[in-house]
Amino acid sequence: MSKAKLEQLRSELDKVNLEILELINKRGELVKQTAQAKENHGADKNYDPVRERDMLELIKKNNTGPFKNATIIHLFKEIFKAGLELQEKDHTNDLLVSRKHKIDNTIIDVNGAKFGDGAPRYIFGPCAVESYEQVAQVAEQIKNKGLKIIRGGAFKPRTSPYDFQGLGFDGLKILKEIADEFGLAVVSEIVSPSDIEKAAEYLDVIQIGARNMQNFELLKAAGEVNKPIVLKRGMSATVSDFINAAEYIHSRGNGEIILCERGIRTYETSTRNTLDITAVPILKQETHLPVIVDVTHSTGRRDLLIPAAKAALAIGADGIMAEVHPDPAVALSDAQQQMDFDQFDQFYNEVVKK
Ligand code: PEP
Ligand code: MN
């Protein structure tokens, strides 16, 4: 063979190598797109043995040599493996709150009530802190039932600026004093990032309300404190928006997040919001965080609190939030939907005690 011929063959080989390289990378791109399409359909994008066998059969059928089938199969299996590794790499982009990132349930201990451990947990208390006496009466009811947590709003994000806005830090002080007296933990909403650090002195759990679910500065501030967070779903937020809001908190270092489904806005007017009950198992599947349901703000109806709570627990919620007031008729907020003490007893007997 002449030297010139050899050079020509070598240059052709180089060309073929580059063509193979281009094709392998083209295949890699297609594998990534296929994985994305499968994920959009909710399917697992990992190894599919049936599909791999079909691809190998097609390759064998078309193999005209000079390589034997066994050699070709070996080479293609390596290419397929590289494609799978490419998908694994994309997994590193998974969210910290995702089940893919952490398979086990996150369990959050609030004064001995372990949210996410499989047993239902409860957060009761008035919509808003109105006075020492009002909160103390509710705290006594909660304690007598052997429950561990009280809620109450001190910073109230109200639709109208002329409505009762809450007692602010004075309200938090009332909550803290009473909670210490009755041995309860306190959950209360904070609306401003600059209040979070100071509020953490009074609170055991910081609530971020529906209206602030995408207040990203507040979420970041919540991610920097060492307190569990109850994050409520925004009234127009998709499940994906909700999960990403939780990720904001987790990404700043605080992974103690309890997700709270509290109903979304729809065209339906027979309830205050529409309780998106299937969001519960979706959130449980997609994240490792505890998920609770606020039956008060979702339904806005006292007559629906018990059935909604039963439905939430039946579908897998880790807990329930509901509002209780000594005299709902004179409550400064949410007068139509808070339970009085008789209704609280009934709720306790039918849902909590079972
Ligand atoms: C609340 O729980 O006090 C409250 C205002 O609820 P939401 O943010 O869900 O409307
Ligand atoms: Mn309320």
Image (cartoon, rainbow, N blue to C red):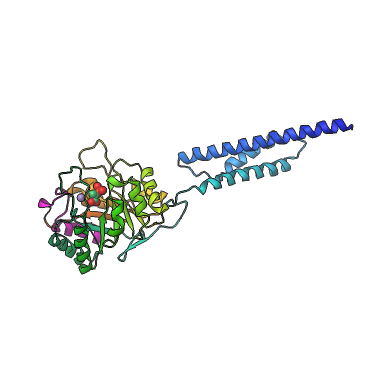
Report the quarter where the C terminus lies.
bottom left
**Residue 164 versus residue 333: which sits nearer the camera?**
164
**Residue 221 versus residue 127: which sits nearer the camera?**
221
Residue 243 on image: x %, y %: 38, 47
Residue 163 on image: x %, y %: 15, 46
Q: Residue furthest right?
A: 1
- Taking the image as shown, residue 309 lies to the left or right of residue 36, namely left
Report the quarter where the N terminus lies.
top right
Residue 79 appears in the figure: yes
Report the span colored magenta: 328-354
| Residue 213 magenta-highlighted | no
Residue 34 on image: x %, y %: 53, 38
Q: Residue at x 40, y 53 (%)?
A: 250
**Residue 165 versus residue 134: which sits nearer the camera?**
165
**Residue 97 versus residue 53: which sits nearer the camera?**
97
- Taking the image as shown, residue 92 lies to the left or right of residue 120, namely right
- Taking the image as shown, residue 321 lies to the left or right of residue 278, namely left
Residue 354 appears in the figure: no
Residue 234 on image: x %, y %: 30, 44
Total numbered badges shown on the rendered structure? 0
The image quadrant of residue 348 is bottom left
| Residue 334 magenta-highlighted | yes
Q: Residue at x 13, y 51 (%)?
A: 332
